Amino acid sequence: MATPFVSGQAALIRSIAPEATVLDVATLIGKTARSLDHLNPAYKEELGAGRTDIGASLDYLVTKGFPPDVEDDFLGDSCADEEDEEENDD
């Protein structure tokens, strides 16, 4: 059931910011999602980005504009940290 909600969220984002790229939209959706880890501790970090939060995505667009400043706003607790760790393992 997630697909209709996420595609609707993407459509709302694009209606506000038609210049948004697919990566911009995906980043905004993923980084404004609410974690479900506290609700399902047995599956911690196995449930994806969490529950989509359309309100948070639209609030971000209204308050901070577009495109999202990925490095400043999102990368502090994202998969980019994992990529850095993988590079250090080489």
Image (cartoon, rainbow, N blue to C red):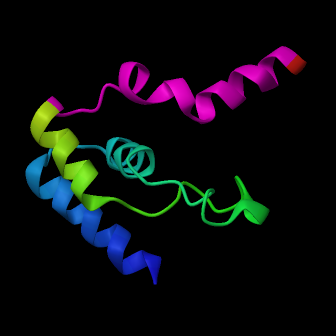
Asked if residue 72 is among those painted magenta in the image, a careful observer would answer: yes
Residue located 10% across and 40% down the image: 62
Q: Which residue lies furthest to the right in this view?
A: 90
Residue located 43% across and 43% down the image: 31
Q: Position of residue 53 (x, y in %)?
A: 33, 59
Q: Where is residue 7 in the image (x, y as percent from the top left)?
A: 32, 70
Q: Can residue 90 be seen in this view?
A: no
Residue located 89% across and 20% down the image: 89
* Viewer-closest of 68 and 46: 46
* Viewer-closest of 87 and 33: 33
Determine whether 8 is above or below 10 in the image: below
- Counting every numbered tag in the picture gives 0
Q: Position of residue 21 (x, y in %)?
A: 29, 44
Viewed as shown, does residue 62 lie left or right of 56?
left
Quarter of the view holding residue 13: bottom left
Q: Identify the magenta region.
A: 64-88
Q: Is the magenta stretch mostly helix, strand or loop?
A: helix
* Viewer-closest of 28 and 45: 45
Asked if residue 24 is among those painted magenta in the image, a careful observer would answer: no
Quarter of the view holding residue 12: bottom left
Residue located 18% across and 54% down the image: 14
Determine whether 17 is above or below 83 in the image: below
Which quadrant of the rendered structure holds the C terminus? top right
Q: Position of residue 25 (x, y in %)?
A: 32, 49
Viewed as shown, does residue 65 lie left or right of 7?
left
